[in-house]
Image (spheres, grey):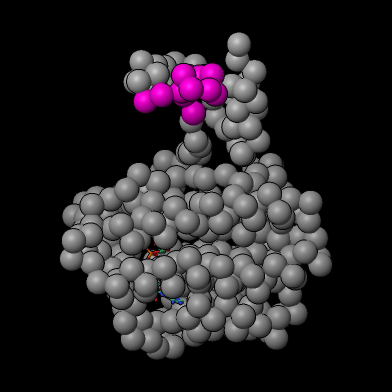
C-alpha cells in the first residue's frame, strides 16, 4: 500500500456509535477524505440507558462545517436495517461499515443481572450482526465491501467484572473471521480491531495521565488503512492504541498425538501433559482445516 494520503471519494461509510469517542474520530476522518458518512448514534449513556439525537447531530455538523458530507441516524444498532437504509436513501450506496457502537455493564459474575448480560449481547453482538446483515447484499452485488468489527482486550484475554462484555467481544472475532471467509470472493474484506483509547467509556477506570497517552486519533489510522480500497488484509485481528499497532493471532502448541483406541485414557494425557502445553514448536492455525490434518495423522498412528 503506497503511503499517500488515503481517500474515499464517492464511497459511503457507515460508522455506528459515531456520536463520540472512537466512532466520532472515524466519522470526522472519513468526512474529511471525500466519503459520504452516516453518523449513527443512539445517544444514550455509556451503560445503554436513554437516547437522543444530539450526539449524532453534533458530529454531522462538524463534518458539514468542514465541507464534508454526512447524515445522522439515531437508531439503535439492533435496528441495523434502518441504519443501512439511511445510507442507501441519502447516498445510494454503502461501501464501508464500521461496527463500533458499544456500551458497558461492568459487574462481577456473582452479581450480574440477566439484563446486564442481555443488553451487552444485544448492542454488541446482535447490533453488529444486524448492521452487517443489512449491508451484505449491497457488498455482494457491487463486489466490494469493507467491514470492521470492534472487539476488546477484555474479549481476547478476559477482564475482571466484564464477562458479559468479554463474551460479546470475542463473539465478534468469530463472527468477523467467518464473514472474512464468506466475503473473500466478493472482495468484501472483514477485520477486527481491539482498540484502547480515552473515551467516556474508559475515563471512569483510567487516570488522566494514562488517558492523555491514549487519544482516539491514534486508533483511527489503522481503521483508515483496513477500510481503504488498496487494502488486501482480511480475517485479521489488530490491537491499536497509544501508538502501538500489532496483529494478534492464535497459537497452537505442537501438542501430543495419541492413538485413538482404548489406550487414549486420562492417564495417557497426563503423561503427555508437557507436550500438550509446549509451545516450542507452535503453529498458527487459520481455520478448522489445520486441525483436521492433525486428526488424520492421529488416526494413522501405529
Ligand atoms: P463511547 O461510549 O465514547 O462510544 C460508543 C458510542 O456508541 C456512544 O456514542 C454511544 O452513544 C453509542 N451507542 C451505544 N449503544 C448504541 C446503540 N445501541 N446503537 C447505536 N449507538 C450506540 O466509547 P468508545 O470507547 O469510543 O467505544 C467505541 C467502541 O470501542 C465500543 O465498541 C467499545 O466497546 C470499543 N472499545 C473501546 C475501548 C477503549 O479503550 N475506549 C477498548 C476496547 C473496546
**Displayed-image quarter of ligand 1:** bottom left
For the question of whether residue 255 can be seen, the reply is: no
Residue 130 among magenta residues: no
- Nearer to the camera, 210 or 108: 108
Q: Residue at x 62, y 23 (%)?
A: 299
Residue at left 66%, top 58%? 146
- Magenta part, dominant SS: loop
Please, which residue is most extreme toward the front here?
262
| Residue closer to the observer: 17 or 107 | 107
Q: Can the viewer see residue 185 in this picture?
A: yes
Instruction: Please give the range of residues in magenta.
Output: 252-266
Instruction: Name the residue at 40% across, 82% down.
Output: 43
Q: Is residue 263 magenta?
A: yes
Give the residue drawn at x 81%, y 65%.
Answer: 142
- Quarter of the image containing the C terminus? top right
* Residue 291: image location, x then y, percent: 59, 32
Residue 31: x %, y % from top left: 59, 70
Q: Please, is residue 248 above or below residue 99 in the view?
A: above
Residue nearest the viewer, comparing 298 with 137: 298
Residue 300: x and y in percent read 64, 18
Q: Is residue 44 left or right of residue 37?
A: left
The quadrant of the picture occupied by the N terminus is top right
Residue 195, position as x, y percentages in the image:
42, 52
Answer with the quarter of the image where residue 176 lies.
bottom right
Q: How many marks?
A: 0
Which of the pair 255/232 is nearer the observer? 255
Amino acid at each position: 500500500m503506497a503511503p499517500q494520503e488515503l481517500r474515499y471519494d464517492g464511497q459511503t461509510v457507515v460508522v455506528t456509535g459515531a456520536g463520540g469517542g472512537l466512532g466520532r474520530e472515524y466519522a470526522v476522518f472519513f468526512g474529511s477524505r471525500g466519503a459520504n458518512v452516516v453518523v449513527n448514534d443512539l445517544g444514550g449513556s455509556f451503560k445503554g440507558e436513554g437516547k437522543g439525537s444530539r450526539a449524532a447531530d453534533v458530529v454531522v455538523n462538524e463534518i458539514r462545517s468542514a465541507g464534508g458530507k454526512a447524515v445522522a441516524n439515531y437508531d439503535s444498532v439492533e435496528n441495523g436495517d434502518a441504519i443501512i437504509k439511511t445510507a442507501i436513501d441519502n447516498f445510494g450506496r454503502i461501501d464501508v461499515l464500521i461496527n463500533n457502537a458499544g456500551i458497558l455493564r461492568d459487574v462481577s459474575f456473582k452479581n450480574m443481572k440477566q439484563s446486564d448480560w442481555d443488553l451487552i449481547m444485544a448492542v454488541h453482538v446482535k447490533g453488529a450482526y444486524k448492521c452487517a446483515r443489512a449491508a451484505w447484499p449491497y457488498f455482494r452485488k457491487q463486489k466490494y465491501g469493507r467491514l470492521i468489527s470492534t472487539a476488546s482486550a477484555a474479549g481476547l484475554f478476559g477482564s475482571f467484572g466484564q464477562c458479559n462484555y468479554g463474551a460479546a467481544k470475542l463473539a465478534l472475532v468469530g463472527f468477523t473471521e467467518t464473514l472474512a471467509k464468506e466475503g473473500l470472493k466478493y472482495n468484501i474484506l472483514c477485520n477486527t480491531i481491539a482498540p484502547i483509547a480515552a473515551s467516556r467509556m474508559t475515563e471512569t477506570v483510567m487516570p488522566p495521565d494514562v488517558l492523555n497517552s491514549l487519544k482516539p486519533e491514534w486508533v483511527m489510522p489503522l481503521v483508515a488503512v483496513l477500510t481503504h480500497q488498496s487494502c488486501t488484509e482480511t480475517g485479521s485481528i489488530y490491537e491499536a492504541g497509544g501508538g502501538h499497532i500489532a496483529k494478534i493471532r492464535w497459537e497452537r502448541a505442537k501438542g501430543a498425538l495419541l492413538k485413538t483406541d482404548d489406550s487414549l485414557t486420562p492417564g495417557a494425557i497426563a503423561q503427555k501433559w508437557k507436550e500438550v502445553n509446549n509451545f516450542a514448536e507452535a503453529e498458527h492455525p487459520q481455520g478448522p482445516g489445520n486441525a483436521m490434518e492433525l486428526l488424520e495423522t492421529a488416526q494413522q498412528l501405529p
